[in-house]
Image (tube, rainbow, N blue to C red):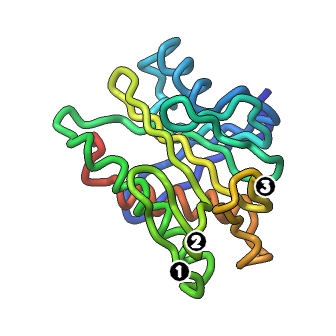
Amino acid sequence: MIDVCKLIMNKKTEIRFHIEKFDELDSTNTFARQKIIQNPWSEFLPYNVILCRSQVKGRGTGDHTWVSLNGNIFMSVIFPLSKDCPHSQLSVAVGTGIAKSLMKICNFAVPVSIKWPNDVLMNQKKVSGVLIEIVERYVIVGIGINLVSAPKEIISSTYLQKYVPNATADNVVELTLQELSSSLSFLLER
């Protein structure tokens, strides 16, 4: 069930994000994939954000699962894909957008880096993971960000509030969407 729908606009790129919030989903990427397949020409489909509080079957790259601890950020962003988009650059552009948002949130006080192809690190520990899938004429960017906790079974992981205790899901999501739209703007269909 949708909790809240709102629009976030990036003033530089003039991209309006339509955000759908859910209490629980199996996986935000799986939900986004179903949404595209069921109605590929929906007016809200481009720049649609699927956000949930709890993910019960989070997916990572390949056969990996994403450990989805409550309170962290789980979202998928649907972007229209340009026909001549160099797919190899998607992962770098997405990682750059997430890394820039985390650097800004921590006021550049904590080292943030990208571990190619799909991890973002803070202080050399994994804080975010990305799963990119292409469906029809859209790219689904699945993003998990450890906001309030990190999986204990993954020793080399961390969480954002360890460094920025007042970071909230709302401000992290908003800044991440703004940075993503900037870093992906050259790859997106207009």
Asked if disc 2 and disc 1 are in contact, CB closer than 8 Å, the reply is yes
Which residue type carries mark 2?
Met
Question: Closer to the N terminus: mark 2 or mark 1?
Answer: 1
- State left or right for residue 174 relative to residue 134: right
Q: Quadrant of residue 173?
A: bottom right
Query: Residue at 30% across / 44% down in the picture?
Result: 188
Query: Relative to 95, does residue 31 appear above or below in the rendering?
Result: above
Kindly identify which numbered label has been placed on residue 152.
Answer: 3
Image position, residue 5 (x, y; %): 69, 40
**Near-viewer residue (156 or 78):** 156
Q: Quadrant of the N terminus?
A: top right
What residue is shown with label 1? 111
Question: Which amino acid type is marked by label 3?
Answer: Lys
Callout 3: helix, strand or loop? Answer: loop
Q: Given this view, does label 2 or label 3 mark the residue nearer the observer?
A: 3
Q: Secondary structure at mark 1?
A: loop
